[in-house]
Amino acid sequence: MRPLLLIAFLLVSGRPSAAQDFQAWVRDLEARGIVVSAGIWEVDTGKILERHHEDLALVPASTTKVVTTYALLKTLKPDATIETEVWGDLKDGVVQGDLTFKGDGDPLFTSERIWMLAQSLKKAGIRRITGGIRLDQSAFDAQREPLGWENTSADTLPVVRALSVDFNRDENGRLVADPDRQARETLQRILQETGIAVESRVGVSGTGVPRKLASWTSPPLRALVQDINKWSNNFMIEMLVRRFGAGSWPRGIQRVQAFYRTAFGLGPEQLQITDGSGLSKDNRLSARTLAIILRGAYHDFEVGPEFVSSLKVIGGEPWKLKVKDPNLTRRVRVKTGHLDQVTSLCGYLQTFDGKVKVFAILLNGPAHDEDVWEQVSRWAN
């Protein structure tokens, strides 16, 4: 063998293969006490390229939102909206008695949007309310939180009510002890700032029958899902899942599971979830289950574009590239997941030859973000 060919042979044969790199990555994680379920598939054919315990169901953390947001988009459709109704006994510009706001699960009923609603009420001729502000929360049942949240940090548990204002947090982002009180006070303050007087007299009722005076429409579901997946907003997805179940968390989760059983053949052994956000450590998903859903969404012409665009784009605005690999910029779309002893990542990546792959990594144990991104960078580059 000629010297140059011999050198080339030695260089190629001495370099670890991609499969060897992947297995070495897995061995290092397992040596540190981390349980791994991971794999990468061709998005076009579904052919698996690398795998390790891809059918092992682990705690998925916020990658659970991939499951719930796609089911909502597919079932309700991207243009679906939610109405918050305003009821009262209005005569000659005066609401006799209380003005009632009837919630139906709009997760983005914020002060800014309430201000616009108040402007529309003023344009409709409402000048004064002889009673106070009343909330109709009847669209949701009395359950305060989903199953499996017993061991979750209290800071992640805002009360999910049919009518919730500003995510049931104060202006500093802290949970409020009495979300209904905050909602009433915020509504009254904004109405008064708009020029609608609220007398807040207790026990005053109108002489007529209240009627619907106005309604306020939420942003479309596609916009809500963008906020949920890009910001990993737990409150918003739990609000939508609860509404999906006609006010009941268990019914909402059952509808999500029924959708995947019918559309993908994923039974309860593949799809074990008790909430919509992934806060519950009772949730169990495998890398394969996540990949099946991601691949199905990618090829879904009806709602796939909305779903894929809701994922965080690495290196894309407004997200800074945390991974020190500029080659990943605009080539990776992901949903991340973090809980104590849980690090997860799933989504899509495009290799330099233009091919798209779908991947999922679930790590249960003392892992770090660098552990998942090490392998994603290897797959992408």
Image (spheres, rainbow, N blue to C red):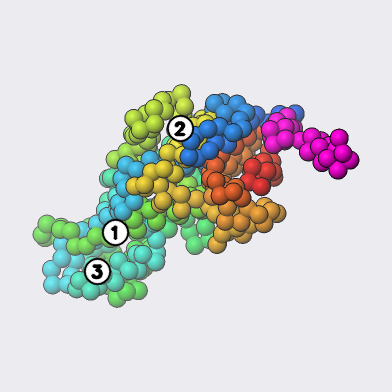
Q: Earlier in the sequence, mark 2 or mark 1?
A: 1
Q: What is the CA distance from the residue labelled 2 to the residue labelled 3?
A: 41 Å
- Magenta-highlighted stretch: main secondary structure? helix
Please tell me which residue is depicted at 27% across the width and 51% down the height of the picture: 136
Residue type for callout 2? Ile
- Please report contact status of discs 2 and 3: CB closer than 8 Å, yes or no: no
Q: Is residue 141 above or below residue 312?
A: above
- Circle 2 or circle 3, nearest the eye: 2
Q: Is residue 208 above or below residue 93?
A: above
Where does residue 335 sit, x and y in percent of width and height?
A: 53, 46
Mark 2, residue position: 273
Where does residue 40 sit, x and y in percent of width and height?
A: 58, 36
Instruction: In the rendered structure, find residue 172 and report the number of the disc placed on it.
Output: none
| Near-viewer residue (197 or 360) | 360
Instruction: Give the magenta part as a residue range.
Output: 1-29
Please tell me which residue is depicted at 54% across the width and 26% down the height of the picture: 55
Q: What is the CA distance from the residue labelled 3 to the residue labelled 1?
A: 14 Å
Mark 3, residue position: 121
Where does residue 324 sit, x and y in percent of width and height?
A: 70, 54
Q: Secondary structure at mark 1?
A: strand
Q: Secondary structure at mark 3?
A: helix
Instruction: In the rendered structure, find residue 217 and report the number of the disc placed on it.
Output: 1
Please tell me which residue is depicted at 70% across the width and 31% down the height of the picture: 23
Q: What is the CA distance from the residue labelled 2 to the residue labelled 1?
A: 30 Å
Residue type for callout 3? Leu
